[in-house]
């Protein structure tokens, strides 16, 4: 595809050239994400195909991302669990591919939540009281703080009273 140009209007609006819209299936109402990387600006249509391409795992996770996109309400994840995703990918794919994948994750309807002192203390309480892996304790602590549903295949979450869980199908874990 050749370079296409557009002009920014007074209110920041840009008309995407028709050939680009057709090629990338950008129709009226399509959500797009903007990513700045090394002084360059990228636009990514957040289509069903893009979400499915993220290998997010179960169909349930893809469905949740699509629903979040459509409702304009991003999913939320603890920065500790984001780190767990990072190292899990890095173990299998290597660091260069992990960086590329995590750059694409930034385009999903996902907000990464900081692990402040209160969340960390709650995670430590869950660890001491229920014996869950520490990263799972952060997910639980974040969820109970903000009344978030935990999406996981980990049955240990059932040990924590009052935690809302959307179970995922089990998958084989690689160490």
Image: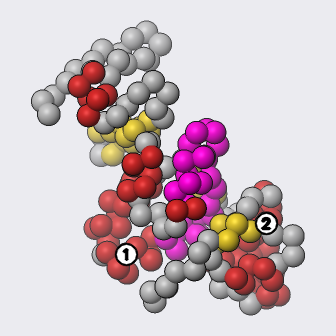
The residue nearer to you, when weighing 8 against 30, is: 30
Which residue appears at 42% of the width and 17% of the height? 13
Among the 4 quarters of the image, the one containing residue 117: bottom right
- Residue to which mark 2 is pinned: 164
Number of the label disc, if any, that sits on residue 53: none
* Pointer 1 local density, CA inside 10 Å: few below 14, some 14–19, many at least 20: some
Which residue appears at 41% of the width and 59% of the height? 54
- Residue to which mark 1 is pinned: 90
**Secondary element at tag 2:** loop
| Above or below: residue 70 compared with residue 98 | above
The residue nearer to you, when weighing 62 against 140, is: 62
The residue nearer to you, when weighing 42 against 159, is: 159
Which residue appears at 59% of the width and 75% of the height? 169
Q: Position of residue 93 (x, y in %)?
A: 31, 75
Q: Is residue 121 left or right of residue 107?
A: right
Labels 1 and 2: the sequence-earlier one: 1
Residue at the far left: name it: 2
The answer, for residue 119, to whether it is visible in the render is: no
**Secondary element at tag 1:** helix
Residue at the far right: name it: 161
| Above or below: residue 145 compared with residue 134 | above
Q: CA distance from mark 1 to mark 2?
A: 30 Å
**Viewer-nearest of discs 1 and 2:** 2
The answer, for residue 10, to whether it is visible in the render is: yes
Labels 1 and 2 touching (C-beta < 8 A): no
Among the 4 quarters of the image, the one containing residue 60: bottom right
Q: Main secondary structure of the magenta part?
A: helix
Q: Which residues are magenta?
A: 61-85
Which residue appears at 27% of the width and 21% of the height? 17
The residue nearer to you, when weighing 137 against 159, is: 159
């Amino acid at each position: 595809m050749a370079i296409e140009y557009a002009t920014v209007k007074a209110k920041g609006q840009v008309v995407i050239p028709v050939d680009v819209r057709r090629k990338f299936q950008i129709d009226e109402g399509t959500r797009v994400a903007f990513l700045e990387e090394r002084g360059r600006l990228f636009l990514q249509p957040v289509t069903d195909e893009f979400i499915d391409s993220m290998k997010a795992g179960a169909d349930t996770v893809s469905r949740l991302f699509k629903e979040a996109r459509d409702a304009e309400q991003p999913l939320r994840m603890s920065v500790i669990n984001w780190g767990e995703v990072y190292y899990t990918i890095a173990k299998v794919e290597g660091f260069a591919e992990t960086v590329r994948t995590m750059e694409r994750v930034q385009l999903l309807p996902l907000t990464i939540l900081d692990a402040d002192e209160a969340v960390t203390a709650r995670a430590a309480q869950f660890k001491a009281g229920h014996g869950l892996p520490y990263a799972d304790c952060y997910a639980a602590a974040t969820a109970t703080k903000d009344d978030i549903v935990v999406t996981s295949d980990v049955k240990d979450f059932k040990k924590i009273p009052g935690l809302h869980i959307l179970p995922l199908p089990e998958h084989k874990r690689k160490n």
